[in-house]
Image: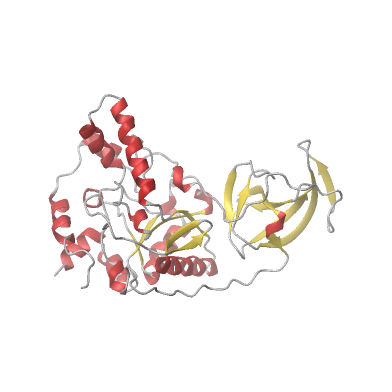
Amino acid sequence: MRLKYKRAAAAILAMITLSGCTGRQAEEKLGSGDMPAGTVPTVTSLWCEETVPDTVTEPPVTSAPVTRGPEGVTSATETGEGYTVYDRSETRYSTDTVNVRELPSTESKVVGQLNPGDSADVTGYTSNGWYRISYNGGTAYVFGEYFSEIKPEIQEKEIVIPEGYYFDDPSDYFFIVNKEIFLPEDYAIETDFVQGSYELEMVAAKHCKDMIAAAEKDGIDLKVLSAYRTVDYQKKLFERNVNSRMKDGMTYDEAYYDVSINVAPPGGSEHNAGLAVDIIDENHWDTYEDFENTKEFEWLYSHCAEYGFILRYLKGKEDITGYVYEPWHYRYVGVDYAAAVMASGMCLEEYIGQNET
């Protein structure tokens, strides 16, 4: 087995022999989403600072008003909010990655995203240039410039591995990153977009996009909630939590230990590696409660290995992985290994530790 880190086995065995957390530590232990420390695992919100969805394109804050209703309208409604809604009924396709908003304004709350080629049922058009669409059981708005009557052709990007790239062999993806085993200082990757503005390492991104597309063909709509995040961001997140505890009276060592229970240290998060993606369904856009009981989770669990991904943080393995059960967190390890890991029922630390030579 060709592993990037030959010190993995020793660190893993040390982790496995550690005793379980104290009652308070077990209560405070959070997921790899690195939510603010001190929040117990029963919280229903998965949002954290870096996971708020953003877009590649966005309309200007002030859109030019439309002086008359567009063709195809059936009636008009004055909203009292400075714009008119012209009712219509048609199907349109997103030509770019765009935010879906609660109201027709760039200052309105983001409630989701559409990717190039996604379809939407249009129910109206506003005088300030937005489409009203049926979305997640209600209505929402997308800026009209990024909608078309014709579904765009999506050109698949060819992966070109540069000379001397960090992952020069498929087996190089089969390694551990956790609170004990950090990324090396020379770690560098090329990234690509997966969905919306979320990125992964370029090979992992290609397989993740293929997985999401395959799910769509089976009638499964998967949404990315978090993916690659920089080590610099992780450092700021960790330090902010340490400083917060020190203000509450802890020493630096006490604060560091307390934060490390909940937040991966810089370079110790799989998201820093660009190989981890948090995936949910449309109905759990801002909550992960009961995600494991959805058809989306069932599909992911059954098919993720075909695309080189594994369910990373398993139920009952918390004392080994250091994280609570996360049915939304998937890690790219490569298609050569994913099926065997998933079939074993072991977490990655156990599997690599057992097979290390």
Left or right of residue 232, residue 174 in this image: left
Residue under the image location 38 percent in, 59 percent down:
274
Q: Quick one: which residue is furthest to the right in this view?
A: 68
Looking at the image, is 306 positioned above or below residue 103? below
Check the image and report above or below for 220 versus 38: below
Q: Quadrant of residue 206?
A: bottom left
The number of callouts visible is 0
Pick the front one: 162 or 344:
162
Residue 298 visible within the image:
yes
Which residue is rendered at x = 25% and y = 27% of the image?
Answer: 250
- Residue at screen point 25% across, 54% down: 182
Quadrant of the frame with the N terminus: bottom left
Q: Position of residue 298 (x, y in %)?
A: 42, 61
Is residue 47 visible from the viewing direction of this image? no
- Of residue 42 and residue 9, the one placed in the foreground of this image is 9
Quarter location, residue 308: bottom left
